[in-house]
Image: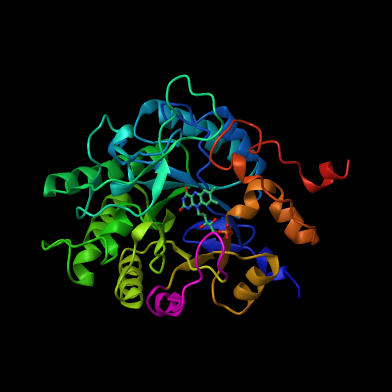
């Protein structure tokens, strides 16, 4: 089967992209220890600049929402300068890059925030464990792991503070030269914690009905589109994902509410994580894509376990306008060329997915280099 559908140009909101291959956000933890983006990151993203669109790795809008060793933030001037180096490098290579705006909510370990409890919609801990900061003088390759803790239930003041952090994050993304922003509403982070019924047990106006559970997202969309035109704002969601203790009693209804909201505000795209095969994430028993399609008229970027052929097939059949690729982008800086030329993909070394420097990050060769 032809992969031509991947190479049809597309307009996402007001952004023209030359192909339908999107680089999915990938946390790689190569910022400095103060969460400032580095020139190594600029090199990495520039290597992948021929993607139709790059979505940056998750980028925290607020120190309280940052619980990942050496992940980047976007709340300080130094971070904006660091990101400007990244966006310039991508633009110099003719590419386009959006910032993924992130707050981890209940999934932040106290170790990252001076021993304080993280915040979340309800006092329910995430399931499992996560990377703790590297202890001083620790020279081992991998980071220590610690279990998630029970968060402090957010007050209205906490909610207002996080929303304001998104406003600043959006403003800073613009200042840093990003072409747009993606609101991270997926993967069990703070927005998802409000959206899904299992993690949102609130009895105020932010909990209970689906309309109430999308309110936090609605207020975040409002401040983000006040800073960046909605035609340059996207939203990533994973309403069927149950990782890290997530769950919703009616993902289809939740998806429709999210889609209607995004439509109401004229967002450029929804980036739906709905894997077509289980692997890094589970293939859902009851997919929600059709529910999204029914209410959202903008671009849909789908993600999860695609290869060139399945992606082209999805696009050709009108199921999604573009497909994003996560794991394939780790070891294939030239993914677009490999897809176009039908070349095999290199396999990533996951030992370096979340830790390290250039090794396993910027040193993956292109196909031509491989062959000398
Ligand atoms: C190393 C790694 C880091 C990731 N970091 C992020 C992230 O920062 N933000 C996000 O929304 N998803 C993140 N994801 C999820 C990917 O964007 C994507 O949804 C997932 O890899 C499934 O797509 P794939 O089958 O094409 O790999 C990450 C995945 C991996 C493997």
Q: Is residue 246 magenta?
A: no
Check the image and report above or below for 241 versus 145: below
Q: Foreground: 175 or 125?
A: 125
Give the image location of residue 15, x and y in percent: 52, 56
Q: Is residue 49 visible?
A: no
Q: Foreground: 52 or 302?
A: 302
Q: Is residue 266 visible?
A: yes
Q: Is residue 285 left or right of residue 166?
A: right
| Image point (49%, 68%), residue name | 274
| Image point (66%, 41%), residue name | 47
Check the image and report above or below for 84 versus 293: above
Give the image location of residue 55, x and y in percent: 51, 50
Q: Is residue 233 left or right of residue 339?
A: left
| Image point (32%, 40%), residue name | 109
Q: Is residue 283 magenta?
A: yes
The span shown in magenta is 277-296
Check the image and report above or below for 10 versus 127: below
Q: Is residue 216 left or right of residue 10?
A: left
Q: Foreground: 44 or 194?
A: 194
Give the image location of residue 113, x and y in percent: 29, 33
Check the image and report above or below for 312 versus 355: below
Look at the image and tell me in which quarter the N terminus lies: bottom right
Give the image location of residue 267, x and y in percent: 38, 62
For the view shown, which residue lies furthest in the right direction?
Answer: 372
By secondary structure, the bulk of the magenta-drawn segment is best described as loop
């Amino acid at each position: 089967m032809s992969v031509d559908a991947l190479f049809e140009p597309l307009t996402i909101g007001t952004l023209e992209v030359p192909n339908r291959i999107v680089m999915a956000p990938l946390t790689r933890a190569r910022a400095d220890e103060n969460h400032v983006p580095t020139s190594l990151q600029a090199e990495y993203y520039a290597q992948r600049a021929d993607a139709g669109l790059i979505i940056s790795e998750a980028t925290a809008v607020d120190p309280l929402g940052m619980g990942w060793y050496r992940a980047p933030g976007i709340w300080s001037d130094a971070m904006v300068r660091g990101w400007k180096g990244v966006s310039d490098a991508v633009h110099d290579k003719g590419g386009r890059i959006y910032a993924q705006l992130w707050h981890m909510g209940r999934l932040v370990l106290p170790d990252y925030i001076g021993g304080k409890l993280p915040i979340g919609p309800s006092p329910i801990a995430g399931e499992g464990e996560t990377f703790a900061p590297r202890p001083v003088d620790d020279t081992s390759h991998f980071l220590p792991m610690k279990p998630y803790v029970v968060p402090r239930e957010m007050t209205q003041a906490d909610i207002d503070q996080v929303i304001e952090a998104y406003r600043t994050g959006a403003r800073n993304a613009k200042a840093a030269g990003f072409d747009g922003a993606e609101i991270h509403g997926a993967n069990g982070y703070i927005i998802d914690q409000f959206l899904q019924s299992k993690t949102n047990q609130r009895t105020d106006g932010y909990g209970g009905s689906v309309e109430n559970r999308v309110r936090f997202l609605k207020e975040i969309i409002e401040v983000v589109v006040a800073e960046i035109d909605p035609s340059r704002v996207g939203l990533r969601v994973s309403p069927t994902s149950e990782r890290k203790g997530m769950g919703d009693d009616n993902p289809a209804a939740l998806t429709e509410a999210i889609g209607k909201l995004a439509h109401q505000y004229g967002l450029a795209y929804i980036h739906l994580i709905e894997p077509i095969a289980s692997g890094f994430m589970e293939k859902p028993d009851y997919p929600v894509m059709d529910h999204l399609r029914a209410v959202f008229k903008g671009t849909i970027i789908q993600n999860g376990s695609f290869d060139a052929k399945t992606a082209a097939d999805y696009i050709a059949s009108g199921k999604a306008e573009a497909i994003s690729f996560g794991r394939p982008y780790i070891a294939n800086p030239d993914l677009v060329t490999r897809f176009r030329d039908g070349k095999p993909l290199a396999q990533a070394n996951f030992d370096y997915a979340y830790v390290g420097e250039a090794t396993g990050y910027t040193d993956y060769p292109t196909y031509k280099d491989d062959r000398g």
